[in-house]
Amino acid sequence: MIAHALLCAVLAVATCCGADLYLVAGTVTNALTRSPLPHAQVYIYKSGTARPSNPYITGPDGRFSFNLPAGSYALHAGVRGTTGNYGSRNDESPVGSAVIVGPGKDTTNLVFRFFPPASISGKVLDDSGEPVDDALVQLIRTSIVAGVRQTAVFRYTRTNDLGGYRLGWIPGGTGYYVTVTGEPWFTKRAQMPGVTGVAPESAQAYGPVYYPGTSDASQAAAIKIGPGEGCMPTSR
Amino acid sequence: MCLLALPVLGQEKLVSMSGVVVNSATGEPVKRALVSITPLFRQPSLSVRTALTDASGVFRFEGVSEGQYLCQAQKPQFVAAKESDGRCSAPSTDFRFGLAPLGVITGRIVDQDGLPLRLVNVYALRAEIQDGLKQIRTDRSVTTDDRGMYRLWNLSPGKYFIKASGFAASTVSYIGDNAPVTSGESFPTTYYGGGKVRDSATPIEIKPGSDAVADLTLTVDRGYRIQGTLANVAPRETVKFELVSGNDASLIRVTLNSETGRFEVAAVTPGSYTLRATQGNSVAETPITMPVSDLSGVAMRLEPPVEIPVNVRFTNEVKQVETIEGPQMAAGCVPMFHPTEGVGNVRVLQPGANPAVAPGRYRLTLQCFNAYVRSALYGSQDLMANPEVTVAPGGAVSIDILATNGSGTLTGRIENAGDNPWILLVPQFLGDAVFQTVEPQDFDMVNLAPGNYLAYAFSSGKDIEFRNRDFIRTLTGGVTVQIEDGKESKVTIPGVVR
């Protein structure tokens, strides 16, 4: 549907003087619940450019709208720091679809399915059951990049005073490995000139330990997590 | 517990030493605390020994030389309780360490619709007295997780303000024409209690082992971009952008092209601010009135530190004194610039040194030796009446001090004061108060300007805002003292005022 917008004269001053503008509108929805997504930021990229439009921020009804000249566009949307591509089928297949805007193209009722991110959280304890603070927790995943399978650290964090960690806003629909490395706090504090007689157990560092508690990487268990899901493993 | 005397090696008698580490707030044993002992005197071995406590909080050292040691215990989330001077001796079986648990503040941050806000900067601000003035400094900062939750730990006892200010931010440098995408939402700085400024914030009192909760609801709204150029940028050096509103400076998300100086601030809510950019000691500031739309064409220029000439004149003849380096001035005054916002070092304008000060706001004090100040001006501003100054970029304002060579001294005693009291001498004329420690009860104060003073004694130097004139006005019971040029005055203060 062509929108011969009266707004053209106002909107098109800088970039599209004289060009017809077409309405590109739709709803951002939670792909799992299908409910409208408020506070989603929707960006439009013209094909071949790297600079997006100013974001449209959805209201309670999840609706967005732009008036654009004819052409091919990429549509991105996300909630506060995460984005997805219009037309992607899940988080693991982020490739989206272009939106073709122009005469005879109905772009007024698009449905942007946003896959909510997942999270993995847990606790790191030492062999006496005490929390380990400042341990490095790494999330490893295997993915296909440019046609090549790669296994790499995807995200990392450090534990807090309770040994707790949380890796939030990660893509669901895939498997992750969790590995932990660290050092007992008393080892770090005892590493000063002239210190002797440190308790024997402090002479070594922890790990790496793979979830669910093995130092053998081949025995590590992948945590399979879906979009919007949370998982709470504990490592020792 | 038993004492075990081990075989004697030469003249050295080896013994054992043991004790317990407890939580000073609850009395419970602290397991896996690290105890260290350091020989204090004449032990053949100067090495430090350490041991971990067991599940009952008990530690034990075997084969220790007889003598005095400095003993310490530590564990994350604890600090040493001030129960002893840390000295212990071997042999002994009953040494008791107290560890005071530190505090925690946790909370959840949501928007006006109750939705959790991720990556919000949360600051724990703490008031402390530095050089006689109350300073608010950031004790810790964290960002919220995907549930909007945050946790601040290892907090020493004291009063804290919790502030949420901006989303996790930094200046991102880029090359080329397209700035990276940034978020389009923002919220005004908000304190726990709902206030937008610190004066209306609700403080949280943290005691040893406290576990406080501070949830905040933020009003998130559409933010708009500020686009502009920053001149004088040194390539490949960090630039920090801040948005200043009142006495709050917030870090913001900025993309900066370090080749062209073109910058873009991500998301700013409508209102009035000062936009500040800092690179090293150079500062750029410009007032911003943010409309309900993007703002472009903002021109800023990094200005180097400002040279401030200091002119000291004397009302009388100043005698030269002979030193190894030759004749030198026997008196002088140097200005000291104390930053009044953020954290910064005191800048002292020493004679002969580069008299440059970074643009900003300061409290000026004048440090004189063998002299006292009659008048002092910063430009046309009377520093004796108002020591708060603003060093503007590119300005060439001088400091003019009129001083008199000479001074008096005061000796005296504080009675009924306990160990290590402090004395405060408040001039009954325009000038800075003098505050110093007393050991154990006799004191000796030099370089005092002649005139009348009121003397007050305090049992401790902690939390005394001696440069705050409002604080000084609350004091009562001062002892009158008269200081005369070239003379020694004496006073006895009967007790502490607090």
Image (cartoon, coloured by chain):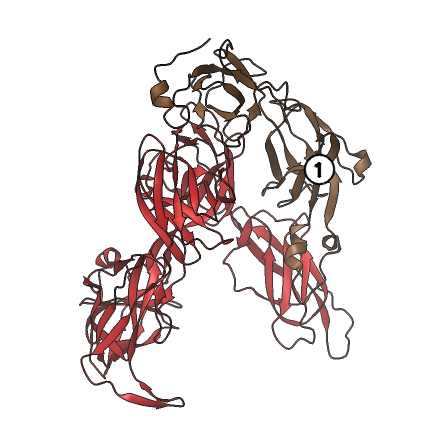
Q: Secondary structure at mark 1?
A: strand
Chain where mark 1 sits: A
Q: Position of residue B400 (x, y in %)?
A: 23, 70
Q: Quadrant of residue B34?
A: bottom right
Q: Nearer the viewer, residue B433 or B414?
A: B433
Q: Quadrant of residue B161?
A: top left
Q: Colour of chain A?
A: brown
Res. B58 visible in picture: no
Quadrant of the image containing the C terminus of chain B: bottom left
Residue at 70% of width from left, 41% of height from top? A180
Q: Position of residue B313 (x, y in %)?
A: 22, 77
Q: Position of residue A185 (x, y in %)?
A: 65, 51
Q: Nearer the viewer, residue A124 or B300?
A: B300
Q: Is residue B389 left or right of residue A67?
A: left
Kind of residue indicated by mark 1: Ala
Q: Is residue A85 above or below residue B451?
A: above
Q: Colour of chain B?
A: red
Q: Which residue is mark 1?
A: A152
